[in-house]
Amino acid sequence: MNNSRLTKISKYLSKHLRHTPEKIGLKLSPGGWVSVNELLIACAKNKFTITLEELKEVVSTNDKKRFSFDETFSLIRANQGHSVEIDLQLQPIVPPDKLYHATGRSSVKSILQTGISKMSRHHVHLSTDVTTAKKVGKRHGKPVVFLVNTGEMSKDGYIFYCADNGVWLVNHVPVQYLKLMDS
């Protein structure tokens, strides 16, 4: 399958598995799961037909590992980034000492005043390396990278989670744990 088709499917799935499942007639379980069959039927009813083979390819080849199947391949969910209320059923885990967050230049002043907020999502997303952070942050323009002292945050009682795709999650990053990196 060509990359353009994979990208279209990935964006469609992201929209409806993370933000607007009801718009195509889906109801996510509390853990964010939906039946693969229900998803394929809902997509077709909404004039965006996806085959099971295409769905499997999107899940297996997506560079950000946005989606997961359950062990039976009968359920699918987005791994994180939801704006709808769900419980990813993640267990708290001690993070590495340092993680990274990138955003557009226009957000730097606000972040330096109030820290990094989750905005419309359930968590702030952090990356294990600068390259990944920049890749995520470039959606907001030329990315600016912050080093996050997650080791100190954890010692100070902040709770972290790690999604199935390796993205680290936390409710908020106060400014005292941030260092603006040279761009």
Image (cartoon, rainbow, N blue to C red):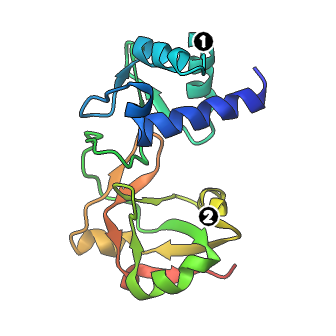
Q: Which residue is under mark 1?
A: 51
Question: Which residue sits at x=38%, y=64%?
Answer: 118
Report the front residue among 151 and 144. Answer: 144
In this view, the mark in front (1 or 2) = 1
- Give the mark nearest the N terminus, 1 or 2: 1
Question: Which residue sits at x=39%, y=24%?
Answer: 25
Tell me the element at label 2: helix
Looking at the image, residue 32 sits to the left or right of residue 11; the answer is left
Report the front residue among 41 and 132. Answer: 41
- Residue 158 placement (x, y as % from top left): 25, 67
Q: Tell me: residue 170, above or below residue 82.
A: below
Looking at the image, residue 14 sits to the left or right of residue 136; the answer is left
Question: Which residue sits at x=50%, y=15%?
Answer: 40
Q: Which residue is under mark 2?
A: 130
Figure label count:
2
What type is the residue that disc 2 sits on? Val
Task: Specify the farthest residue to the left.
Answer: 157
What type is the residue that disc 1 sits on? Thr
- Residue 119 placement (x, y as % from top left): 40, 64
Contact (Cβ within 8 Å) of mark 1 with mark 2? no
Report the front residue among 65 and 120. Answer: 120
